[in-house]
Amino acid sequence: MTTEVSDGRPRPGRRPGRRPGAADTRGEILAAARRVFAERGFDKATIRGIAREAGVDPALVHHYFDSKEGTFVAAMRLPVDPSSALPLILSGPREEIGERLVRFVLTMTADPAAREPLLGLVRTAMVNEQAVGMIREFFSTAILGRVAETLNVPPLRMQAAFAQLFGVVMTRYILRFEPLASADIEEMVALLGPTMQRYLAE
């Protein structure tokens, strides 16, 4: 791409990407993404809209975060990106997916550094209607809907499975009921795996 200067000679045009003088383009994109997701929700937000808000080329958003889901995960400091987590859960024998799902969720949330941003987002959602809608759309579209479609499971079953696991995480780390709060992960997998399997069976 070229442009002309006053003497008529062509000169290279500005390439899309990092803006001149931008010290933290990635951070500015994340700040813009938080604003866009908060204003438009997950479903209506777009990479182009986030790029426009940040004043960068959409290709730069893709470069840093790959997808809209990846941008949301980074902006909200969530512990895992569905694009990398779901293949791990969905691969392997269908009859063991309940156990894999429980083990993955409880192992991930066992790490305080991974757990706290997620719990913080949940606390915000409890008092902020915009946050509720944004989180609901993300989980429904990027996680539950994708798993339900891949496994050919009715959405009601998928949401019921999610609700039970969500309740376990909240009881384990917010209410801290004992002995649930300190139970071994594999003990919980043995207890909850068959229930999750029933929800997710064909």
Image (tube, rainbow, N blue to C red):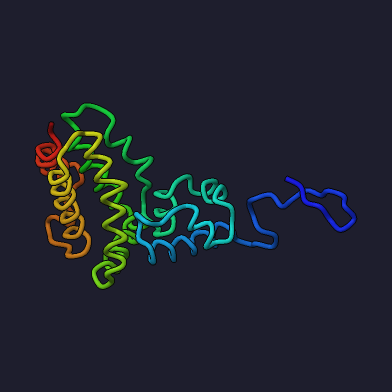
- Against 115, residue 98 (above or below) is above
| Image quadrant in which you'd find residue 37 | bottom left
- Against 84, residue 50 (above or below) is below
Quadrant of the drawing holding the N terminus? top right
Q: Residue 107 in the image: state x and y as whole percent.
A: 28, 46
| Residue 27 falls left or right of residue 68 | right
The tally of labels here is 0
Q: Residue 136 in the image: state x and y as whole percent.
A: 26, 57
Which residue corresponds to the image point at 33% horizontal and 35% vertical from the top-left?
87
| Residue 15 falls left or right of residue 181 | right
Q: Residue 57 in the image: state x and y as whole percent.
A: 58, 52
Q: Residue furthest top?
A: 93
| Image quadrant in which you'd find residue 54 | bottom right
| Residue 14 falls left or right of residue 63 | right
- Against 173, residue 188 (above or below) is above
Which of the pair 18/81 is nearer the observer? 18
Q: Residue furthest bottom?
A: 127
Which of the pair 201/99 is nearer the observer? 201
Which of the pair 18/122 is nearer the observer? 18
Which residue corresponds to the image point at 16% horizontal and 53% vertical from the top-left?
163
Which residue corresponds to the image point at 81% horizontal and 52% vertical from the top-left?
4
| Image quadrant in which you'd find residue 93 | top left
Q: Residue 188 in the image: state x and y as whole percent.
A: 15, 45
Which residue corresponds to the image point at 12% horizontal and 59% vertical from the top-left?
178
Quadrant of the drawing holding the C terminus? top left
